[in-house]
Amino acid sequence: MTQTERGDVDDSEAVKAAKSARANAKTLESALKQYVLAHFGDTNPAIADFGYSPRKVAQKSVAEKHESVEKQLATRAARHTMGSPAPDPAVGGTSH
């Protein structure tokens, strides 16, 4: 093996080691973030101490809420659902 080939081998091993270290660091970072979010909650401002930003809660506009209600009512009409099902009198009744 020549000096150049030996240098290339050393470089490729260094690249593999760097990729492995980066993957391990990414895994550790992900685990830390999950722990911090589980411990403090994803909307708590205290997570900023760890470098994470609180999750933004989506705010629906009145028009979006209205559209959602219209879709819900249309679905219920299409499926002919009137509400929650009535309890079955043959099941769970008291014995007297």
Image (cartoon, rainbow, N blue to C red):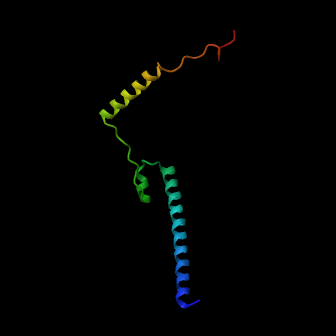
Instruction: Give the camera-side residue of 85 and 25.
Output: 85
Residue at position x 44%, y 23% in the image: 78
Residue 4, horizontal then vertical, whole percent: 52, 88
Q: Quadrant of the C terminus?
A: top right
Residue at position x 48%, y 51% in the image: 37
Residue 12, horizontal then vertical, whole percent: 53, 78
Give the vertical position of 8 relative to 26 (above or below): below
Side of 34 relative to 69 (left or right): right
Residue at position x 52%, y 80% in the image: 11
**Looking at the rendering, which quadrant does residue 95 occupy?**
top right
Instruction: Give the camera-side residue of 86 and 4.
Output: 4
Residue at position x 56%, y 82% in the image: 9
Give the vertical position of 11 relative to 86 (above or below): below
Instruction: Give the camera-side residue of 37 and 26.
Output: 26
Give the vertical position of 40 relative to 80 (above or below): below
Exactly how many numbered labels are in the figure?
A: 0
**Looking at the rendering, which quadrant does residue 50 occupy?**
bottom left
* Residue that lies at the very extreme toward the right in this rendered image: 96
* Residue that lies at the very extreme toward the top in this rendered image: 96
Q: Quadrant of the N terminus?
A: bottom right
Residue 40, horizontal then vertical, whole percent: 48, 50
Instruction: Give the camera-side residue of 46 and 24.
Output: 24
Give the vertical position of 59 relative to 36 (above or below): above
